[in-house]
Amino acid sequence: MSAGLAAELTQLETAWPRDLPQGVIHADLFPDNVFFLGDKLSGLIDFYFACTDALAYDLAICLNAWCFEPDHSYNVTKGKSLLQSYGAVRALSARERAVLPVLARGAALRFLLTRLVDWFDERGSALVRRKDPVEYFRKLRFHQAVTSVRDYGIEA
């Protein structure tokens, strides 16, 4: 598996877009960092990874965190809803749509690798809750098979 991950990292380094709209992103917007009162957003926490980066990268992180089922299958209905709702506030450019699969792969690889580190290098004093890295390996496999943004539920 490590040779495959190294190859994926090399491919992503080559394909990674560097010309996308930038801004402050959360970069870790998982369900356990978001609070709702009823159906209204009421709070966000855990800004440890917040940074200035591609806005669409934050969206790719959310696709990974919010749009897969417990069996690790991609839920196109959730994906379409997320992407359309995001687009209603800030439309993705044609370039951002085109590179969304690369961004989603990069996000999946990021969380796979960080989970692997936590899994195998657990320090007794660390405040890290170990999470299964295989979840993100399966998500990465899905993104590697994506041929266009249509696979996420929206038009290119």
Image (cartoon, rainbow, N blue to C red):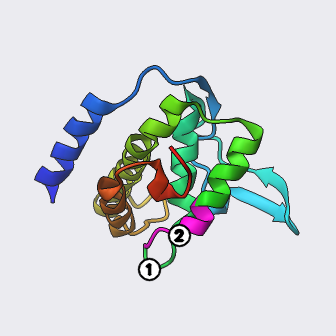
When asked about the image quadrant of residue 88, the answer is: top right
Work out whether residue 90 can be spotted.
Answer: yes
Label 1, residues with CA under 10 Å away: few <14, some 14-19, many ≥20: few
Asked if 68 appears above or below 18 in the picture, the reply is below
Q: Nearer the viewer, residue 63 or 151?
A: 151
Work out whether residue 127 can be spotted.
Answer: no
Residue in view at x 43 percent, y 47 percent: 107
Residue in view at x 51 percent, y 68 percent: 68
Compared across the picture, whether 57 is left or right of 135 comes to right
Looking at the image, the residue that sits furthest to the front is 155
Range drawn in magenta: 73-79
Looking at the rendered structure, the secondary structure element under dot 1 is loop
Indicate the position of residue 102 as horizontal and vertical percent values.
38, 41
Cα separation, mark 2 vs mark 1, equals: 10 Å
Looking at the image, the residue that sits furthest to the bottom is 71
Q: Amino acid at mark 1?
A: Asp
Q: Which residue is mark 2?
A: 75
User: Does the segment drawn in magenta span residue 74?
Assistant: yes
User: Does the segment drawn in magenta span residue 43?
Assistant: no
Q: Which residue is mark 1?
A: 71
